[in-house]
Image: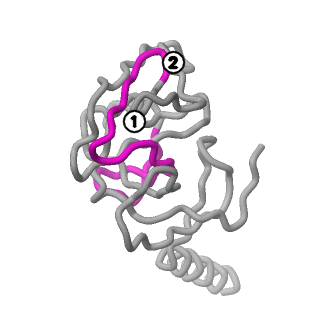
Amino acid sequence: MVMSVAAVAAILLAVTAVAGGYRINLTPSEPLGLWRIIPLDRPAAVDDLLFICPPETAAMREARARGYLRSGSCPGGFAPLIKTVMAVAGQHVEIGDSVSVDGRGVSSSSLAQRDGKGRPLTPSPSAIIPPGYVFLHSAFPGSYDSRYFGPVPASAILGLAQEVLTYAP
């Protein structure tokens, strides 16, 4: 009986946390721990730290098969990502050995040729970000972000990412 009450309480707590926009980050792209999704009542801007649902693309399905993405509540069964906006519609993103936006280099943006298991990584082509899209980045060296999967639709943005209780190892 006590176990049943505890289980029901845990389920109610989890549902309340998710409904309140709380998420746990277990990936190294941003500090580990508890985060909150804050509604975004304006267009995304450069340097915004966002929660975003990965689009249902072949690149994302391959990323999930390779273990880069976790399962979660986004369409396609993906978990939301926490990434920083590096470019918005109209900006030119050049992808070479590293990334530049409108001719300015992006720090911590060197590209890897292979993942941690030696599998080849294909960079996204250079482009001008189209209307309704954003280019995402994480300074974590092993991050899987727009350097590899390209710009993502702004419609996939869940909101701003706010740290609540985190730990950066």
Q: Which residues are magenta?
A: 69-98
- In the rendered image, the vertical position of residue 104 relative to residue 73, given as above or below: above
Q: Position of residue 124 (x, y in %)?
A: 33, 26
User: Looking at the image, which residue is at 66% across and 81% down?
Assistant: 6
Q: Position of residue 52 (x, y in %)?
A: 41, 55
User: Looking at the image, which residue is at 37% across and 69% down?
Assistant: 42
Q: How is the image coloured?
A: one colour
SS type, badge 1: helix
Q: Callout 1, which amino acid?
A: Ser
3D distance between C-alphas at marks 2 and 1: 13 Å
Q: Is residue 87 left or right of residue 84?
A: left
Most extreme residue toward the front is: 103
User: Looking at the image, which residue is at 45% across and 48% down?
Assistant: 85
Foreground pick, 102 / 131? 102
Q: Quadrant of residue 65?
A: top left
Q: In the picture, which quadrant includes the N terminus?
A: bottom right
Q: Quadrant of residue 58?
A: top left
Residue 47: assigned label? none
Q: Residues within 10 Å of mark 2 (few under 14, many from 20)?
A: some
Give the residue pinned by disc 2: 112
Q: Is residue 48 left or right of residue 91?
A: right
Q: Is residue 92 magenta?
A: yes
Foreground pick, 45 / 77? 45
Q: Position of residue 156 (x, y in %)?
A: 32, 57
Q: Callout 2, which amino acid?
A: Ala
Give the residue pinned by disc 1: 146
- In the rendered image, the vertical position of residue 126 relative to residue 136, given as above or below: above
- In the rendered image, the vertical position of residue 137 relative to residue 14, given as above or below: above
Foreground pick, 52 / 18? 52
Q: Position of residue 125 (x, y in %)?
A: 29, 23
User: Looking at the image, which residue is at 30% across and 32% down?
Assistant: 59
